[in-house]
Image (cartoon, rainbow, N blue to C red):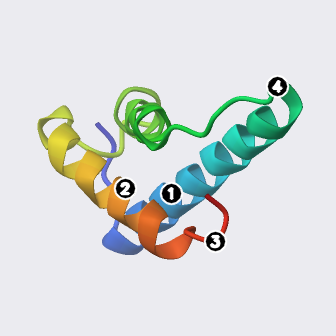
Amino acid sequence: MKRYSKEIVKQIIDSTIYTHLNKYIIEEIVNNKKFNLEILVNDIVVDLIDNKEIISPNYRSILKDIISMEIKNNYQTII
């Protein structure tokens, strides 16, 4: 696992949330799919832990809660 400062980790998490959220919104519009927060959060967590390896798998459950709250608080008008 790579080591990053807290600021960099926060930026990577924010960027990943934004990227996935945009992808889901486009998919929702184009394919007329219903938005599902749980699927979105799971995809983001998998990306952060498995693909980017910036957070330990031990924090998977906590990360899900944090990302879910982050989306609800900061992107509520979008979803």
User: How far from the left and from the top, in percent, is residue 71?
Assistant: 47, 62
The residue where tag 2 is placed is: 67
Disc 4 residue type (three-letter) = Asn
The residue under the point 50% across, 57% down is 12
Q: Earlier in the sequence, mark 1 or mark 3?
A: 1
Which residue occupies the foreground of this view, 47 or 66? Answer: 66
Image position of 16 with respect to 66: above or below: above
The residue where tag 1 is placed is: 12
Q: Is residue 75 visible?
A: yes
Disc 2 residue type (three-letter) = Ile
Question: Which of the two discs, 2 and 1, sits closer to the camera?
Answer: 2
Q: Is residue 4 visible?
A: no
Query: Disc 1, disc 3: CB below 8 Å?
Result: no
Secondary structure of residue under mark 1: helix
Question: Which of the two discs, 2 and 3, sits closer to the camera?
Answer: 3
Quadrant containing the C terminus in the rendered view: bottom right
In the figure, is residue 60 to the left or right of 29? left
Label 1, label 3: how far apart the Cα atoms are: 22 Å
Secondary structure of residue under mark 3: loop
Query: Disc 2, disc 3: CB below 8 Å?
Result: no
Secondary structure of residue under mark 2: helix
The residue under the point 33% across, 43% down is 2
Circle 1: is it few (<14), some (14-19), or many (20+) Cα within 10 Å? some
Label 4, label 1: how far apart the Cα atoms are: 28 Å
Secondary structure of residue under mark 4: helix
Disc 3 residue type (three-letter) = Thr
